Amino acid sequence: MSKLKYLLIIEFAVIALLVGKSLFRSEEYHGYVPDPVQVDLAVPGTITVAGGDGDVGVSLMAEYTIEGVVKSKEAYSDYTSTISKYDVAMAWGELNQEEADEEIHYSQSGRWYYYRYSEDCPVTMDYIASHSANVHLIHKDKEILKKIKRIRKEDYVRFEGYLVKVNYENGPWESSLSRTDTGDGACEVLYVTSVEIIDEKDYPLLQSKTAGRNME
């Protein structure tokens, strides 16, 4: 193979890699993200979710839509993983603006999420707690699960579905219905009916809505 052909092949491979990344992965988002939208159900409905160890009764408590940047994603193999294989730690509001984001570190373990922030962080601990969450994801079907598997850290994602109470025989696994609680029971348990990785071309539209906003 001539040197010219070799260089052309290398150049083509690099271009293909760059184009592929732009087509299939979103860039890291630095901007404002709207708060989750929750509509409580006057009368909770009940559905049955097929789990690895049999069907599980699930009570629907509130319609829920959450947009945010995925700061961490963790797969689990505990007993709840028969219907909820993944948790995502998500951040919204001002937390994705660069001056805040670079000062906060997120992690997950044991169905919990954790965050650390530096003394230079421009937002308070209370703001971080009320604008980030660990979300336990229950997939509606295999297609939803495939989409969840494709999610990567720093993806901007929108989930739609229901906050639920899972009625296990050994006790309920119940979602929080508040964004301001912390500690045990503060996570959202979300039955996911729709998931979308939002394309980066939509980011400027979100940023334009927040011109002139200041972080708390």
Image (tube, rainbow, N blue to C red):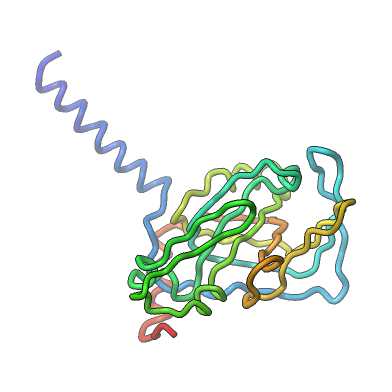
Closer to the camera, 212 or 111?
A: 111
Q: Is residue 169 left or right of residue 9?
A: right
Q: Residue at (36%, 75%) from the top-left corner?
A: 119
128 displayed left or right of 168: left
Label count reads: 0
In the rendered image, which quarter contains the N terminus? top left
The quarter holding residue 167 reads bottom right
Q: Which residue shows up at 19% across the image and 32% down it?
A: 11
The answer to which quarter of the image holds residue 97 is bottom left
Find residue 35 and report its horizontal and vertical position in percent. 56, 75
Q: Is residue 70 above or below residue 148?
A: below
Residue 147 can be seen in this image: no
Q: Which x, y percent locates residue 158?
A: 56, 61
Report if residue 195 is visible in the image: yes
On the image, the x and y values in percent for residue 15 come to 25, 38
Residue appearing at x 83%, y 59% in the figure: 172
Residue at image x 68%, y 64%?
A: 188
Residues 78 and 150: in front is: 78
Give the residue furthest to the left: 3
Q: Nearer the viewer, residue 12 or 56?
A: 56
Residue 109: horizontal and vertical position, in percent?
A: 58, 52
Front residue (pair 170, 189): 170
> In the rendered image, which quarter is residue 194 located in?
bottom right
Instruction: Identify the residue at the far front of this view.
Output: 119
Q: Is 133 placed above or below 11 here?
A: below
The C terminus, quarter of image: bottom left
